[in-house]
Image (cartoon, rainbow, N blue to C red):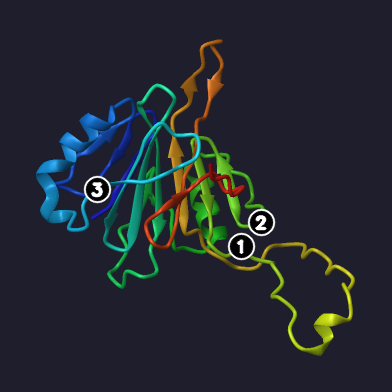
Amino acid sequence: MTIDLLPGRGVRLPAPLPELGFGLTETAVRALLAPHGGLLPDGVWNTFVCGCRWALSFQLPGVSVTLCADGRDRLRSVTVGRNPSDDRPACPVGYHGIDLLGWPAHELVEALRADGLPVPDPTRGTLHHHPLHLSCHHPPGRPAARQGPSASRGPSRPARKPRHEGPFSFDVVSFHQAAERDDGGDDDGAEATAGTDGTATGDDAGATG
């Protein structure tokens, strides 16, 4: 039961759910999902994602899925995020046959590079490699809030940034297709970050309308 991200095509949901191709309208997406209500007991609902003409969300075991449209009302991006409130085993999210979520980030990077993809090292818990954007709910290296009497003594000297990020795994992947702008350039469109409750927010910078 794997969610497959298909470069240049869209997303193939676990069978018997359908493949959803980039460029579909909201009506077409709903029509493809409608016969499978038994596998989507929570239904398919509208959600808000800043910069998207429409966005739909639904739940699969262990994950939340959000579909977003570009300015032309066509499906342009898919975001899948781990849902910690769902205790079912999470659906794997495959890209080039590699499961993207839940594995140590450094192992994932090594696997993607071994498959010939020139992915960069993660930075502050994120990794960008078109058409992927991987992130985690709790980026490594963020200091915990100070508590107790010492918290009122003013700011301390900033900690030296570690040479390498500590171990972590990615929880969220956004997958998109470049959209042509009117001037002929490319526009990656909006990305969504699936929240733990199945809602979606804007790009990892925290943009919400």
Q: Which residue is drawn at 44% across and 24% down?
A: 71
Q: Where is residue 161 in the image (x, y as percent from the top left)?
A: 79, 63
Amino acid type, label 3:
Val
- Distance, label 3 to label 1, CA atoms, is 29 Å
Choose top left, top right, bottom left or bottom right for residue 153. Answer: bottom right
Q: Residue at x 12, y 47 (%)?
A: 36
Choose top left, top right, bottom left or bottom right for residue 30. Answer: top left
SS class of the residue under badge 3?
A: loop
Q: Could you tell whether 5 is left or right of 193 in the image?
A: left
What is the crowding at mark 1: few (fewer than 14 residues within 10 Å), some, or many (at least 20)? some
Q: Is residue 99 visible?
A: no
Q: Could you tell whether 194 is left or right of 134 in the image?
A: left
Q: Residue at x 57, y 59 (%)?
A: 106
Choose top left, top right, bottom left or bottom right for residue 91. Answer: bottom left
* Towards the viewer: 160 or 110: 160
Residue sitting at the far front: 209
Query: For residue 124, which numbered disc appears in the image?
Result: 2
Q: Could you tell whether 147 is left or right of 81 in the image?
A: right
Q: Can residue 156 be seen in this view?
A: yes
What is the crowding at mark 3: few (fewer than 14 residues within 10 Å), some, or many (at least 20)? some
What is the crowding at mark 2: few (fewer than 14 residues within 10 Å), some, or many (at least 20)? some
Which residue is label 3 attached to?
44
Q: Where is residue 207 in the image (x, y as percent from the top left)?
A: 58, 45
Residue sitting at the far top: 183
Amino acid type, label 1:
Pro
Which residue is label 1 attached to?
139
Q: Position of residue 195 (x, y in %)?
A: 44, 57
